[in-house]
Amino acid sequence: MSSTQSHSLQQQRDSGAAHAQRVRILNLLNDTPQGLTRADIARQTGFALSSVCGRVGELIESGHAENSAFTTTDPLTLRTVRPVVAIFPGA
């Protein structure tokens, strides 16, 4: 990663933008029990797919979300994908 990319990433983290994105994605996942693909999340939030992938990775790493056990086909790309689902504590 270049120093410019590292600096931009750190600025985003410091600004709270990444946190706000994680909260919005988690709320969306909470409202969609069957899960959503990363592309679905990007389309519904307007976030860049790269941002969605980063935030979803952080949610998975923190134990707030996981990749679903099943796959589906994305209707736009026709690729096989694994939706992301929220993890409910105590469920």
Image: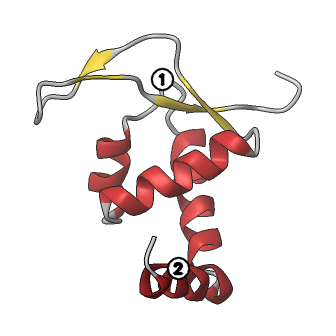
Which residue is found at the position 60% from the left and 60% from the top?
Answer: 22
Is residue 63 positioned above or below 58 on the image?
above
Please identify the quarter of the rendering in which residue 16 is found. bottom right
Residue sitting at 51 percent across and 48 percent down? 28
Q: Position of residue 49 (x, y in %)?
A: 32, 56
In the picture, the disc for residue 8 is none
| x, y percent for residue 78 | 11, 25
Residue visible at 54% across and 48% down?
56
Percent of width and height locating residue 23: 63, 61
Q: Are marks 1 and 2 in contact (CB under 8 Å)?
A: no
Q: Is residue 69 above or below residue 79?
A: above
Q: Which residue is mark 1?
A: 34
> In which quadrant of the rendered image does the C terminus lie?
top right
Viewer-proximal residue among 13 and 87: 13
Query: What's the CA distance linking mark 1 and mark 2?
Result: 35 Å
Residue located 65% across and 40% down the image? 60
Which residue type does callout 1 highlight? Gln
Q: What residue is pinned by disc 2?
A: 6
Crowd band around label 1 with a 10 angstrom C-alpha radius: few (<14), some (14–19), many (20+):
few
Expressed as whole percent of the image width and height from the top left, the position of residue 54 reads 50, 56
Question: Most extreme residue toward the front, as rendered?
Answer: 2
Seen in the picture, residue 17 relative to 41 is either above or below; the reply is below
Which circle, 1 or 2, is nearer the viewer? 2
Left or right, residue 89 beside residue 35: right
Q: Secondary structure at mark 1?
A: loop
81 left or right, relative to 74? right
